[in-house]
Amino acid sequence: MDYSLGDIIQTRKQHPCGSDQWTIIRVGADFKIKCLKCSRIVMLDRETFLKRVKKVIQKADDTPS
Ligand SMILES: [Zn+2]
């Protein structure tokens, strides 16, 4: 699976605010994700990120052509 900026993802564990949906704001050796509900930003190394992600809800480039 390939992740890119702006993707909406769901994590296996909920954020303390109750949301489990995040948008990706940085990719690379480290990933930054922002909680869609409370806007908290979390930085994770790639390995941790890949373990936390449950699924991609919406790809950023998923635009109808
Ligand atoms: Zn949150």
Image: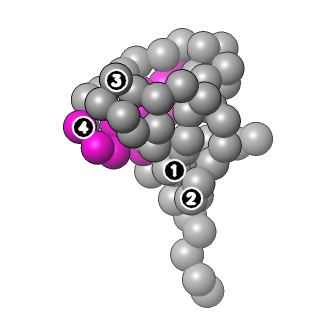
Mark 3 C-beta to ligand 1 under 8 Å? yes
Residue range (magenta):
23-38
Q: How far apart are marks 1 and 3 (CA)?
A: 21 Å
The x, y position of residue 28, in whole percent, is: 54, 26
Q: Earlier in the sequence, mark 4 or mark 3?
A: 3
Q: Is residue 29 visible?
A: no
Q: Residue at x 56, y 64 (%)?
A: 61
* Front label number (1 vs 4): 4
Secondary structure at numbered mark 4: loop
What residue is disc 1 on? Answer: 7
Amino acid type, label 2? Gln
**In the image, is residue 65 above or below residue 38?**
below
Q: Evaluate if marks 2 and 1 touch, with contact meaning CB atoms under 8 Å apart.
A: yes
Q: How far apart are marks 2 and 1 (CA)?
A: 6 Å
What residue is disc 3 on? Answer: 16
Provide the major secondary structure of the magenta segment: strand
Q: Which residue lies furthest to the front in this view?
A: 18
Q: Which of marks 1 and 3 is nearer the N terminus?
A: 1
Q: Is residue 38 visible?
A: yes
Q: Which of 12 and 25 is in front in this view?
A: 12
What residue is disc 4 on? Answer: 39
What residue is disc 2 on? Answer: 58
Mark 4 C-beta to ligand 1 under 8 Å? yes
**In the image, is residue 8 above or below residue 1?**
below
Amino acid type, label 4? Ser
